[in-house]
Structures are given as structure tokens and as C-alpha cells.
Image (cartoon, rainbow, N blue to C red):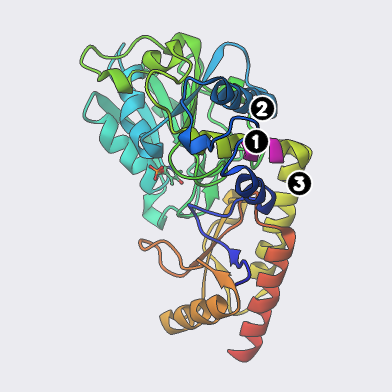
Amino acid sequence: MERVYNFSAGPSMLPLEVLEKVQKELVCYGDSGMSVMEMSHRSKPFEKIIQGAEATLRELMHIPDNYKVLFLQGGGSTQFAMIPLNLMNKNKKCDIVLTGQWSKKAKSEASKYGKVNVVASSEDKVFSYIPELDKSKFDPEADYFYITYNNTIYGTRYTELPDTGNVPLVTDISSIILSEEIDVSKFGLLFAGAQKNVGPAGVTVVIVRDDLIGNAMDFTPTMLDYKTHADNDSLYNTPPCFAIYVAGLVFEWVKEQGGVKAVQAVNEKKAGILYNFLDESSLFKGTVVPKDRSLMNAPFILPTEDLNAKFIKEATSAGFVNLKGHRTVGGMRASMYNAMPVEGVEKLVEFMKKFEMENK
Ligand SMILES: *Cc1c(COP(=O)(O)O)cnc(C)c1O
């Protein structure tokens, strides 16, 4: 069977070159005589793998020296608890902007450990925009200010960051990491579950400023304390070795594409192709306010549920898969992460045009 165009929101497409490299090295990695899956996490070859992955990521994201890069487990969702446990320990307060399911989950976890101030929310219009922020609602005594940079489900993204002064800005970059340039120095902490744009599920990347490490609440489990992992270079216990290895190959691949800036240009092109069509179409409609549109996740709808279902069915048969929207939104969603080639989006739009002609 041929590979399909996979528009999944996550786990999602990996670059074919990376999959082929993994296949080649799967049984015998380098001159180790074994698979990465069989290797001690304290062995020389694995040490090289994890250090190499970190070095390449630092280079790609221009991560300053006063930030640690951690490779953790528990997915993006564990960070919803880990962040308050480690950061909400001065005034027991945080600010948050609600832009979808992921920030709501972050809010509900943080509420277990302190007071959460909702600065703004776009829930009134099904999270179809990024709300304007009124600085007078920011709490200058908040221990951190939390945003979801790109909203995977609703397809919105920040194009302007809030100025939080001395309050550390914390962000979930699960579905935007390495897809466009992000100024790490503007943040206290950034995190991403790998399975959207970095590699297979199982590893979570946390980038955290040194001064935010070592202040965890007394009852914080050892495994949920950033200090545990920072002091041990992510090798306190067995890390998700294989996922880190594949992520390292993806980082190398991004570098070979010309780095984040070059990949961003391709992502802007892909998103442009789809959004331009949505704006012209008399049948398909984008659901997000144009200025807040995500480059990675594009939700869209047809006039009726029957047409949505028909489109998804026919698209799947034609080799465009995982286009069904999130269960809370319905309709369709095309996720166009780094590994999705321009050709995949071009062909999808051709298919949508044909569908429109046939269903007018
Ligand atoms: C997928 C996703 C998560 C959840 O990640 P898990 O690894 O499944 O816990 C969190 N935030 C965003 C923005 C996501 O897209």
C-alpha cells in the first residue's frame, strides 16, 4: 500500500526520510550491535543520541544558555500539573488566557494548587479567535502567566505575545514547536508533547529558565520536580529513549531543510493555499477569524452535517485521511505540520474544488 496524505492533528506525519533512516538503523544502530530500543540509557551511544538531540534543538530554536532543555514523559498533559507544582510557589497565583480545551485543562490542574485568574477567554465564540488582552486585568503578583501558543483543536494562534513584565510567561507549544520562529527569551517556560511536530508520542520537551527550577512545592513528587530532571540531564530514570532518538532525527531533518525560518516559509505557503481557497469557496468555510489563523491546524466546515460526512468519506477514499474535526467542534480539520509536503495541501485543495463542483 502507498503512503496516504495524513492530516492528523497528532500523532501525525513524520518526514519520510526520518522513517526510512529509523528503518535502516532499527535492528543495528551504528556499530553498537543492537537497536536503540535495546540499549542502556547510560550507554555511550545513547549519551550521544540525547546530547545530540538537545544540541540540535538548542541550535534550531536559539535557546539561550540560561535555559535547560528537558526530555520528560507524561505527555503535554502532565505539564498542566507540573507547571503549577514548580512555579506557583511564591504568591500561589497565576494568570491564564482561555483559548480552548488545552488551556482549560491547564486551568483546572492549576486550580488544585492555587488561585487562577482568567485574564480573557474566547469561549463565547467557540474559541474561534484569540481574545484582546486588557493589561489592567493582569495580576502583577502572579507567579506566572499562561497561554496556549497554538490551539490545535480550534486552529487559532497568537501572533502577538502579551507583555507580562516581570511575570514569567509560560506557554504550551505542543502544536507550534519548530513550525515557526519562537523567541524563547520572551518566556520563562515552554513545553511540547512530541507527537505533533517533533517525533513519536512518549517524550515531552520542556524548555525552562534556570531561575524557575528548584522552587517546587514541598509535596511535589520527585518525578514532577523539574530540578530532578535538570540535575540529571533528563537521565534521573529511564527516559523514553526511542522517542528521543527519533526526535533527534527530526531535529536534524529540520536543520537539513534550512532550519525553522525555512520551514516556516513552507508552512506559510501551505496554509496560504488552503486558506485562500476557503476564502474563495462558496461551499467550504473556515471557522477561525482570519488574523488569528493557525499555520498548523485549519478547521473548516460545509453547510450541512451530511456534506461534512460525505466529504470526509470521499476524501478518505482518495487518500486524504484524518480530516475529521475534533469531536467538540465537528466539521473538518486539516493539520499541516512540518512533514506535510506542499504537494499534499495542493492536492487536497484540488480535491476540495472538485467536491465543490459536484455538490453545489
Ligand atoms: C495534543 C496537545 C496536548 C496534549 O498532549 P498529550 O501529549 O496528549 O498530553 C496539549 N496541548 C496542546 C496544544 C496539544 O495540541
Q: Quadrant of residue 177?
A: top right
Sequence-earlier tag: 2 or 3? 2
Outermost residue to the front? 33
Task: Kindly identify the amino acid type of the residue bearing the numbered disc 2.
Answer: Thr
Q: Quadrant of residue 264?
A: top right
- Of helix, strand and loop, which one carries label 3? helix
Q: Quadrant of ligand 1?
A: top left
Query: Does residue 192 show up?
Result: no
Residue at x 36% of width, y 25% of height: 83
The spot of residue 38 in percent (x, y) is 47, 35
Eyeballing the image, is 306 above or below 323? below
Q: Which residue is mark 3?
A: 265
Residue at x 52% of width, y 47% of height: 196
Task: Kindly identify the amino acid type of the residue bearing the numbered disc 3.
Answer: Ala
Residue 251's label in the rendered image is 1
- Of helix, strand and loop, which one carries label 1? helix
Eyeballing the image, is 199 above or below 287? above
Q: Residues within 10 Å of mark 2 (few under 14, many from 20)?
A: some
Q: Are marks 2 and 1 in contact (CB under 8 Å)?
A: yes
Stretch of the chain drawn in magenta: 249-253
